[in-house]
Image (tube, grey):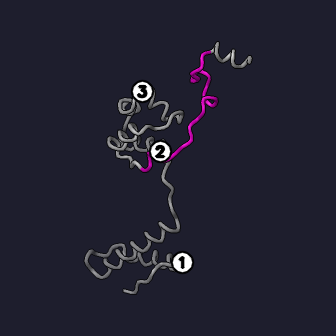
Amino acid sequence: MNISPIKDDASYKSAMARIETLMNAKLNTPEGDELDILATLIETYEDKHFPIDAPDPIAAINHCMEALGMSRKELEDLIGKNRASEILNKSRKLSITMIRKLHTKMGIPADILIKDYEVRSASKLSPSKSKQKPAKRARAKAA
């Protein structure tokens, strides 16, 4: 077993090629140990050189809903009917209570749920979503 740190692209490719030859190695054998060590070295190199950003909180909710076979109604039961719609449409931020429920019931990591995301302003929403009454809007426009 001749293992050295992975420092560049060439040593990374070499380690990947070696892993290909060791994929069927048995546990607790010299080849199995080499596979384990190389996999750890490659994982460390990839984490450093090919980082993956955490997903947007709403994308994470949608993904988990799909993965769990969860309906929108079930999400509404969890965080509230109007709130679920507002959250999924990004017109409202997640509250700490919602984050706790989503983390506990859906298993979404809290560090993903607390990540900041842009909320659509009222002007970007359709007129039916605006909370301002038509008469008040007309007065504001005329002023």
| Residue at screen point 50% across, 68% down | 48
Residue type at the position of mark 1: Asp
- Most prominent secondary structure in the magenta stretch? loop
Label ID, residue 8: 1
- What's the distance in space between the residues labelled 1 and 3, CA to CA? 52 Å
Based on the picture, tell me whether residue 120 belongs to the magenta stretch. yes
User: Do the numbered discs 3 and 2 sit on residues whose CB atoms are within 8 Å?
Assistant: no
Q: Quadrant of the N terminus?
A: bottom left
Secondary structure, mark 1, is loop
Q: Which of disc 3 and disc 1 is earlier in sequence?
A: 1
Residue 82 lies in what quarter of the image? Answer: top left
Of badges 1 and 3, the one in the foreground is 3
- Above or below residue 57? Residue 128 is above
Query: Residue 108's spot in the image, x, y percent?
Result: 38, 46
Q: Is residue 88 left or right of residue 29?
A: right
Q: Where is residue 46 in the image (x, y as percent from the top left)?
A: 48, 68
Picture disc at residue 129: none
> Judging from the image, what secondary structure is the residue with disc 2 in?
helix
Q: Where is residue 116 in the image (x, y as percent from the top left)?
A: 51, 45
What is the crowding at mark 3: few (fewer than 14 residues within 10 Å), some, or many (at least 20)?
Answer: some
Q: Is mark 3 on a helix, strand or loop?
A: helix
Amino acid on which the number 2 mark rests in the picture: Pro
**Residue ranking furthest to the bottom:** 2
Mark drawn on residue 81: 3
The residue singled out by tag 2 in the image is 57
What's the residue type where badge 3 is placed? Lys
Magenta stretch: give its range: 111-133
For the residue carrying disc 1, how many other residues have a C-alpha within 10 Å: few (<14), some (14-19), or many (20+)? few
Q: Is residue 28 magenta?
A: no
- Residue at position x 28%, y 75% in the image: 26
In depth, the one of 73 and 102 nearer the eye is: 102
